[in-house]
Image (cartoon, rainbow, N blue to C red):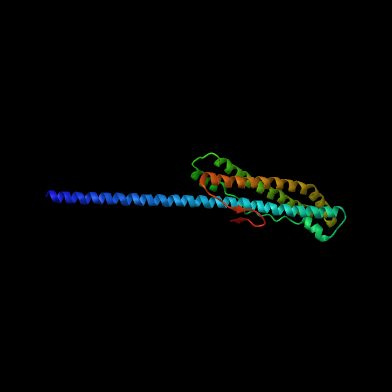
């Protein structure tokens, strides 16, 4: 009877220990899987933020070159070096504006703040990204007003020459301001990108190799 009892107790203990080991293993596996999931989401979010900021820089760089070219054509027109239709069209054509680079600050903040555990410096860099995003779309809004003014002026006057003269005058006044605004905001976005990359490396050991030029690349 004693042997039966000890045998049963041994079996029970073995079952309990085996169950506990299985539970701990499953728990560790699930926690490891969750940690990997959180890490992967953080890495993907970080790369996406950098890509969007870099694309915003690239778009602003293209707009800057476009306006500088328009300014050169406008200077030629003012100096009576050319009155060709192509030059006037180059100055007065609508700006093509890329509106699809809006950074979802709420979503990325949720991911990064959760992973950051309230570490210093993270809130500041997120704020910088938020401001960068606003600056990018402020420029697009400014240039969209140019497009709207052009369409409005075209409706107001019947004489094509009067329309062109008004629009060329409007361009002459505003192009230098456009260039100044783009240059300033391009620099701010560039600094935000570098600050974000440095923060991700320092706080999370996430290294993002990204280059900005005619083509944006994640190296």
Please name the residue shown 25% across and 51% down the image: 15
Instruction: Residue 189 in the image: state x and y as whole percent.
Output: 64, 47
- Residue 85 relative to residue 4: left or right: right
Q: Is residue 134 visible?
A: no
Instruction: Residue 139 in the image: state x and y as whole percent.
Output: 69, 48
Please name the residue shown 84% across and 55% down the image: 76
Instruction: Residue 179 in the image: state x and y as whole percent.
Output: 74, 48
Quick one: 115 or 141, which is closer to the camera? 115
Instruction: Residue 126 in the image: state x and y as whole percent.
Output: 57, 43
- Residue 140 relative to residue 82: left or right: left
Quick one: 83 or 6, which is closer to the camera? 6
- Residue 91 relative to residue 99: left or right: right
> Where on the picture, by quarter, is residue 195?
top right
Q: Is residue 173 visible?
A: yes
Tell me how many marks there are: 0
For the view shown, which residue lies furthest in the top direction? 120
Please name the residue shown 58% across and 50% down the image: 49
Question: Split into 4 quadrants, where in the image is the C terminus?
Answer: bottom right
């Amino acid at each position: 009877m004693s042997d039966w009892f000890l045998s049963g107790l041994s079996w029970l203990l073995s079952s309990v220990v085996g169950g506990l080991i299985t539970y701990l293993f499953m728990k560790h596996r699930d926690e490891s899987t969750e940690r990997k999931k959180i890490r992967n989401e953080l890495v993907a979010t970080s790369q996406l933020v950098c890509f969007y900021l870099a694309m915003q820089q690239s778009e602003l760089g293209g707009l800057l070159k476009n306006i500088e070219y328009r300014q050169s054509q406008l200077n030629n027109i003012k100096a009576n070096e050319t009155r060709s239709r192509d030059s006037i069209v180059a100055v007065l054509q609508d700006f093509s504006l890329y509106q699809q680079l809006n950074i979802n600050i709420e979503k990325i903040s949720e991911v990064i703040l959760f992973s950051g555990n309230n570490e210093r410096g993270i809130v500041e860099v997120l704020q910088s990204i938020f401001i960068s995003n606003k600056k990018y779309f402020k420029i697009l809004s400014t240039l969209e007003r140019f497009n709207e003014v052009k369409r409005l002026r075209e409706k107001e006057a019947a004489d094509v020459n009067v329309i062109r003269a008004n629009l060329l005058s409007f361009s002459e006044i505003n192009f230098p301001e456009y260039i100044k605004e783009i240059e300033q905001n391009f620099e701010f976005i560039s600094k935000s990108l570098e600050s974000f990359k440095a923060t991700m490396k320092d706080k999370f050991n996430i290294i993002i190799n990204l280059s900005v030029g005619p083509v944006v690349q994640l190296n």
